[in-house]
Amino acid sequence: MDENRQSLASSFLSFALAILAILTLRWLLVEPYVIPSGSMIPTLLIHDHILVNKLAYGVRVPFTDRWLLKRDSPKRGEVVVFRFKEPYAPNSSEYFMIKRVIGIGGDKVEYSSDGELIINGEPVPRTALPSPENGDQAPYYPATPADLGGPFDVFRFYEETLDAGSYRVMFMKQSYRWSDRPFIVPDGHLFLMGDSRDNSKDSRAWGSWPEDKLLGRAMFVWLSCEETLPFLPFLCHPLKLRWNRFFHGIE
């Protein structure tokens, strides 16, 4: 009987330590996240499974927004995951969201009617890219119409360059947009936008967002699929995998 109790206690301890190690890994180092919408197309596609670097900006006190150790601040151009709650719906639940950092505390951000970004009075450098149908967009992932959510001739593409490097953005050719008045980003906040500029609810709609709500910086896609299983929508369909996106870095 004593041996059985010892064996049971040992098994329980091993299980508890394994769970603790997994939770510690997710709290401290990395956390998985699944892209639920198309707001970051063409950089991130629906059903991309990514890993988020939770050490990028520091270590938090578990289950709080307080920093235990602050390492760094987000740079313009980085793709970040953060906890979001609708600012005009105080009773709504909090959920995770992913966007690109466009402005940091103190920046003046403007957005013209043709989609050009202007930060602190300087236009963000951008270069027109050929349609994937007519030319090569290397080194960027060769997206298909299914990935983009429509035929190639509906969209136009640009390469923008900010502090963290260059990345690709997408616009709807026939979409109407208007010039936003200059927005001054408060200290400790971020101005965040999706890379699918005409299909993203972001800081243009709800303003800047507190830096303390950041979960971490997006690192790479480790799994991707065109469809999920009908009866288990959180799992990728094994016959619909995007093999060439596995371990795809996030610019």
Image (cartoon, rainbow, N blue to C red):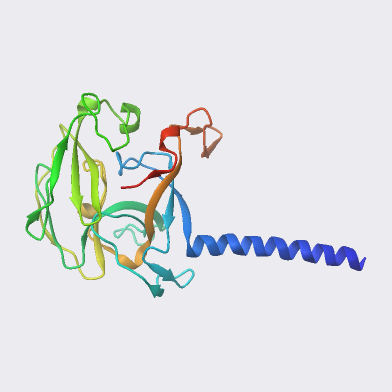
Quarter occupied by residue 177:
top left
Quarter occupied by residue 54:
bottom left
Q: Please name whichever residue, 172 or 167, is drawn nearer the observer in this view of the structure.
A: 167
For residue 6, side relative to residue 79 (left or right)? right
Quarter occupied by residue 46:
top left
Q: Residue at x 41, y 34 (%)?
A: 244
The percent coordinates of residue 233 (x first, y second) are 51, 38
The percent coordinates of residue 101 (x first, y second) are 26, 56
Residue 207 visible somewhere in the drawing: yes
For residue 173, side relative to residue 144 (left or right)? left
Q: Residue at x 39, y 69 (%)?
A: 58
Q: Residue at x 16, y 68 (%)?
A: 106
The percent coordinates of residue 120 (x first, y second) are 10, 61
| Relative height, residue 10 to residue 230 (above, below) | below
For residue 166, side relative to residue 117 (left or right)? right
The percent coordinates of residue 130 (x first, y second) are 18, 30
| Relative height, residue 201 to residue 92 (above, below) | above
Q: Please name whichever residue, 142 or 238, is drawn nearer the observer in this view of the structure.
A: 142
